[in-house]
Image (cartoon, grey):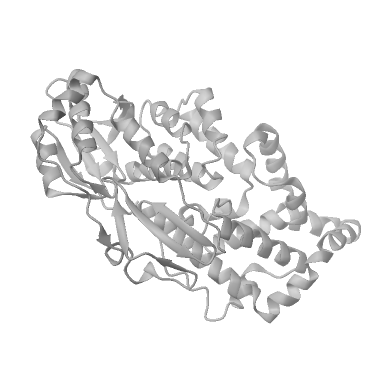
Amino acid sequence: MRGLHISSQAGWRGHIFALLVAAPLGVIALSSTTAALELPKPEPVEKFLGTTAVGENYKVKPVVRSDGVMRIFDVDTKYGEYSFDGIEFAKLRLHELNAVAALEKMSQSDAFGKAFGQAALGPIKFGADLITKPADTVERSLSGIGNMFDRVGAGLSNNRADRDPLVESLLGISDTQRELAVELDVDPYTDFPPLAQRLKQMAGAMAGGGLPIKAGLSFVPGGIGIAVSSVATVSSAKDTLRDKTAAQLIAEVRGILLKLEIEQQNIDLLLENRNYTPADLLIMARALRQLGAADTNIFVAKAAAAGTRNYAFYFRRRAQILAAHSKEVGGVASFISVAGQPINVLRDGRIIAAFTFDDVVWTDVQSRTFTAATAEIHRLKPGAVPVLATTGVVTPMAQAEITKLGWKIVKFKPQG
């Protein structure tokens, strides 16, 4: 019987709603006068995923639910049943499932079988090479002397956040795993069990058997064939992820955050939060550096408290979207906190709330949310016309009601 692996939908959505609906009781009561509300509508999966709703090792169920902000994808796979919150997060997971299929094809090839048979000799071969060819061995295990010193220093200063086991690093497995993952355009430190397990197994066999990554992938019948692409893959940081250890990535992230004047406590909390992979942290930190907004500490403090994988991914995507679209809206100047949620002030003084939501449906939650947020924004800046920027769809009713409250709505393209 397949295992059941359902993500914490209620926890993820509860976090979002709790952040957005922090408001005085008197303000919330105002929303009771709003009689017109709507229910989120289920939609066919093809609307969001097209033909990629079905893959070699998965099938997304035909009806996609919504909770009013995020679409919920139920997926039947060879490895169990999963539920993914959000279009981009679902695309990321399907992308990873396609990578799993490619790895499984590789493992069935004759060439890989030969390499796998030699994998057990890896530690013995390593020991012999260390005596007879020490320079070559160090180069293979640590990717060069200069990089070795960088790794030692990074590991000592970020030991609690490091994700590369020492023994596996010495055997070359972690290096091979990172290279293999980058060639597949997936996160080397993925928390998705089907992919994480197979990456480790394949990388271990290839490192021990001396099979080059690209040669191994060339043995995949019909090619790699990863059909589902996503802006949430690691291509934007692939060189760093291939060449640097987890400790080195964490060191870079720490340096970026320090230059952004993030409080040390928030830096530590973020880096030690295992709901983020090192790739997430790197991509998010680089996006925040590109954004260059004042008071970024407000954003990082909230991001550091992410209690689920979905929630962490949401913050990574928000940072990417803000960095990608800042110029489009006139330049993001700073972060502020409204109803417990980090939003932004533009260079011209306007206030913008940018979210990576799939849907904005005028439910009771949204009614209370925007009523509360509007009141708080007007307390902070009387007469302000706040801007709602979202990557998702705003229903006609939601658009009408949000506009009545004095907001302007801007649609961002999801790419970023």
From the viewer's side, name the closer residue of 1 and 230: 1
Left or right of 8 in this view: 40: left
From the viewer's side, name the closer residue of 397 and 205: 397
- Residue name at image x 68 percent, y 54 percent: 174
Question: How many marks can you see?
Answer: 0
Eyeballing the image, is 211 above or below 64?
below
Q: Quadrant of residue 49?
A: bottom left
Eyeballing the image, is 273 above or below 105?
above
Residue 141 image point, x, y percent: 75, 55
**Quadrant housing the N terminus:** bottom right
From the viewer's side, name the closer residue of 276 and 16: 16
Left or right of 409 in this view: 137: right
Eyeballing the image, is 321 above or below 127?
above
Residue 315 in sight from this viewpoint: no
Residue 329 image point, x, y percent: 22, 41
- Residue name at image x 19 percent, y 44 percent: 410
Q: Quadrant of residue 315?
A: top left
Residue 192 in sight from this viewpoint: yes
- Residue name at image x 49 percent, y 32 percent: 257
Residue 216 image point, x, y percent: 64, 73
